[in-house]
Image: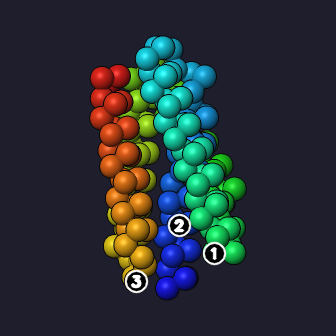
Amino acid sequence: MKKEMISLLNAFYYNAALGADAIGAILSSAKDEAFQLTLYRQLQYYRQQESRLTEQMHGLYEVPTEPGSMLRLWMDLMIRCKTLYGLTDERLAKMMMQGSQMGIIQLIRALNHSGKVPERLHAQGEKILEHEQAFINELKPFL
């Protein structure tokens, strides 16, 4: 069961780390103050998640697995390519929504394949999924 718990916690951590990286890459390009605030609040959420998940992993005598440098490079390149033709808040919001959708898919997959883990971890994952969907809904007005 410990192996499944670590795998699931790593999936949660991975989602938060990539989300924080993506927001960090675009935050300074956002022009609308409300949009900037929305992104900043989500960045704070991701940072809190990273901290909380690190503590949970330490409780299992493990360290979270960071997303690989190649993945981070790929994500940075994708952001740069998608913003070559102009950085509008609409384009940035669309990118964030797409990234969050990908994160939701990965989280659902991790939950579905988690095997026997304590119910509290499933509940934690469901709460993260709800927050991701709420973030997508917050981005809709910027499209």
| Residue at (39% x, 82% y) in the render | 115
Give the tally of numbered discs: 3
Q: Residues within 10 Å of mark 2 (few under 14, many from 20)?
A: many
Secondary element at tag 1: loop
Query: Which residue corresponds to the image point at 64% horizontal and 70% vertical from the top-left?
Result: 59
- Find residue 49 and name its label: none
Q: What's the distance in space between the residues labelled 3 and 1, CA to CA?
A: 16 Å
Residue 11 lies, in percent from the top left, at 51, 64
Q: Position of residue 135 (x, y in %)?
A: 37, 38
> Counting other residues with Cα less than 10 Å from the Cα at mark 1, is it few (<14), some (14-19), or many (20 or more)?
few
Label 3 sits on residue: 116
Marks 1 & 2, CB-CB < 8 Å contact? yes
13 over 20 or under it: above or below: below
From where the camera sits, is residue 15 visible?
yes
Query: x and y percent of residue 24 in the render?
Result: 61, 35
User: In percent of the image, x 41 and y 53: which residue is there?
Assistant: 128
Pointer 3 or 1: first along the chain? 1
Residue type at mark 3 is Lys
Mark 2 lies on residue: 9
Q: Nearer the viewer, mark 1 or mark 2?
A: 1
Mark 1 / mark 2, whichever is N-terminal? 2
Residue under pointer 1:
60
- The answer to which of 73 and 113 lies nearer the viewer is 113
Compared with 66, 6 (above or below) is: below
Residue at 40% x, 83% y: name it. Answer: 116
What color scheme is it? rainbow
| CA separation in Å, label 3 and label 2 | 13 Å
Q: Toward the viewer: 15 or 125?
A: 125
Q: Foreground residue, 116 or 89?
A: 116
Around disc 3, counting alpha carbons within 10 Å, would you say few (fewer than 14), some (14 to 19), or many (20 or more)?
few
Q: Marks 1 and 2, Cα distance to the nearest angstrom?
A: 10 Å
